[in-house]
Image (cartoon, rainbow, N blue to C red):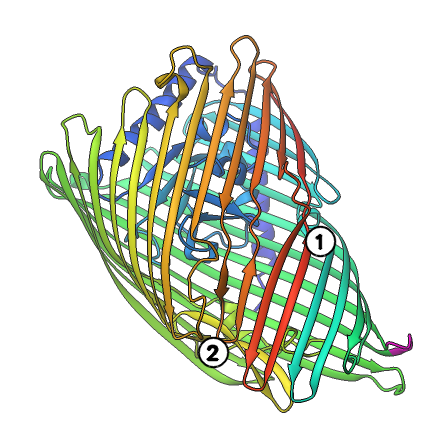
Amino acid sequence: MQAPLSSVLTLLLCNALAVSAQAQTPQAAPVTKKEDTQRVEIQARSETQLARQEAAAKTVIGSADLLKFGDTNVLDAMRRVPGVQVNNNKIQLLGMNANYTQVLIDGEPPRGVNVEDIPMQMIERIEIYRTANAQFSTQAVGGTVNIILKRAATTSQQSIKLTAGHVQREQGSVEWNNSGKQGNFSHSVAATASMNTIGANIPRHTFTEQTIEDSNGLQQYNSFTDKRMNDRDVRIAPRLQYKTDSNINLISTTMFAYGSGEADSTKKYDFTKGMPLKVADIHSHDTSERTNLNSTVRATTNLSNDLKLDISAGFHAHRSSNTQHSLNYKSTGELDFARDYDTSVRVLGAHTSGKISIPTNAEHDLVLGWTGSGTTVHIDRDQTDIDATKPTPVLTPQSARNELYKSALYAQDEWKFQKNSSIYLGLRWESLGINSEGSAQQTSKYSTSVLSPIVQTMWQLDPQNVDRVRLGLARTYQAPNDFYLVSPRIYSVNNSMQNPNFVGNPHLRPELAWGLDAAFEHNGKDGLNYAIRAKVQQIDDLHRDTIYKEDNVWWKKYVNAGSAQGQSVEMSTQFPLKRFMNDAPDVDVSMTYMHFWSNVKGLPQPFNQLNPYTYQFTLNLNYRLKDLPLTMGMNAKLQDSHWQQISLTDREYLKSPATLDLFALWKFDKKNQLRLAINNITNSNTINTNSISQVPGSISTLQTTVDRARNVNLSYEYKF
């Protein structure tokens, strides 16, 4: 079912008219910038202080810390946070890969938008939970990163930011922000247009060497891929707030994104031993177009007896179309066949959430809440093959309709049972249901539910809460990726063990995990902060892919395979260098070291680990010059590499080169600033990956070399 076009246009028009009307209305005299700055700093400091006093462990990064280094997006800012890593534009908490870290926007999944698309000026703070919290989904085996958006603008302000960069090709963006407040109404709107933010980060060249040994003998060949991609994106994010005379806060948040792109690629094979493959040369042209819309209205109020009510509702819609035209040539240079893919995806859904904060007494803070969402997904995929010797095309149409339902109920209580100690008790029930039907699959129904108890406790070791100890126990889970469940059949050219067809598995169960966390934290008034954290986890029903042969054709799908135990120790610290050296330059230091141990049962031996490395060390330095308005910084990462059994049939060795990122920020005045960032300055030109696939009677080895380049970005921001 498509989104009603009239509803979508009406909502966008209302938001646009409201912002336009506000911009044309004479503004009240703004509060002085000094007072505004002080208020922001006090609010950020109070959030941080509250987090240190709560039993539910979280780390708070305020807006002042996020903005002070001029980062162009939230991913750049998160690189400097201890215990956080950014890989392939994904935020992950150290210990497990990015799929296990839950990233939320105002406590909700980012439906249809990417977190890097959120303008920095719209972010109030970021909360990091390394243990589950009942208010959020417990799909947080590795932890949760919650991005909190600003509720209300305090002053009228506009800014424009221009960014130009180069990775493997040029990229750039322009961002405009506007905010204002008059009486009970406030608004903020951000609009961004970008070019090649996706394509510039996709490897241009890939070289592979492959060997396959089976009953047919030994086969060896190489392949070289060259891919050139262009993409364009436009994003608009208006946020409106109105406070009624009856003390009800109404907040409307809308995020709209449109993108398009095209790519041209060639893949050439060189057969060195054994039987050559059917196709030796592939030329492809891809086009894509996508539209995302997410709109939510939230209402908060205080009822009688200080009862607090927080309710939200909204809808989300997505539409995308992808086409691919490929020409497939034989080793003799003759055209073998042409193949066209035409894929259309339409998504429409609604979501709601709410919570009630019930006052009890000074020792308890009781919260009850719910969330729910329903989404309908239509997928149409047509494959057309035209054989060079047969004029009649062969059409293979596929269509699927999937309905996804998610709901949750939760309760939590923070109980301060002693003056310097407290305990957090939470219980969350979540359910997931999928109804799936399609032309190339049987009608299926899938449902699962998870009950997650959560217990956390905190002891202050001194009255000033400089030192504290935490302990937490929680049950979490990882739901199957929708694509793993309901994907239609995808057919590959030159089908092989390393290049199989793909099919969804509607019977895939969620991964279930128990985690025990312990931590010691120190936050000194002299600027010295450090923490030691340990974690033990048991994970069952791991999601792993498997390769199998059916009717002489290779297929891949995801299945539940085995269980795992993991342990980790994390040591992190932050301090100004002057804390130890009186004459030291004005340098802030942040360091994190993490060590991992793990064992996976149910996968073939050896190399049964959850992570492709056993340790990781990160170092951040930020240096402010005394006589110049210049701040410089660096981020360095070092980790080892080892073989890892990644599925029932594959093991992999991914080389992890050391990385070094640098930035410099020049603030001309309070309105103008210029930022230069260079990522991967060591210029490790390639990343090498070795993998081995093994099934009874067949073994395949593959070595892949991928281009890796420096990422240079220059950004200028002007506030007016």
Q: Which residue is mark 2?
A: 506
Q: Position of residue 560 (x, y in %)?
A: 42, 75
Total count of labels = 2
Question: Which amino acid type is marked by label 2?
Answer: Pro
Residue 260 is marked as: 1
Can residue 72 be seen in the rendering of this structure? no
User: Does label 1 or label 2 sit earlier along the sequence?
Assistant: 1
Check disc 2: other Cα within 10 Å, few if <14, some if 14-19, many if 20+: many
Residue at 47% in and 44% down: 85
Q: Quadrant of the N terminus?
A: bottom right
Dot 1 falls on a residue whose secondary structure is strand
Q: Position of residue 86 (x, y in %)?
A: 51, 45
Judge whether 705 appears above or below 38 on screen: below
Distance from label 1 to label 2 (Cα)? 31 Å
Can residue 322 be seen in the rendering of this structure? yes
Observer-nearest of 695 and 513: 695
Left or right relative to 578: residue 326: right
Q: Is residue 455 a member of the stretch shown in magenta?
A: no
Judge whether 312 appears above or below 599 on screen: above
Dot 2 falls on a residue whose secondary structure is loop
The magenta span reads: 331-335
Residue at 38% in and 11% down: 582
- Residue placed furthest toward the left: 418
Observer-nearest of 268 and 701: 701
Left or right relative to 506: residue 287: right
Observer-nearest of 100 and 25: 100
Judge whether 491 appears above or below 682 on screen: below
Left or right relative to 98: residue 550: right
Quarter of image, res 688: bottom right
> Are the residues at dot 1 and dot 2 in contact (C-beta closer than 8 Å)?
no
**What is the chief secondary structure element of the magenta stretch?**
loop
Comparing labels 1 and 2, the label whose residue is closer to the camera:
2
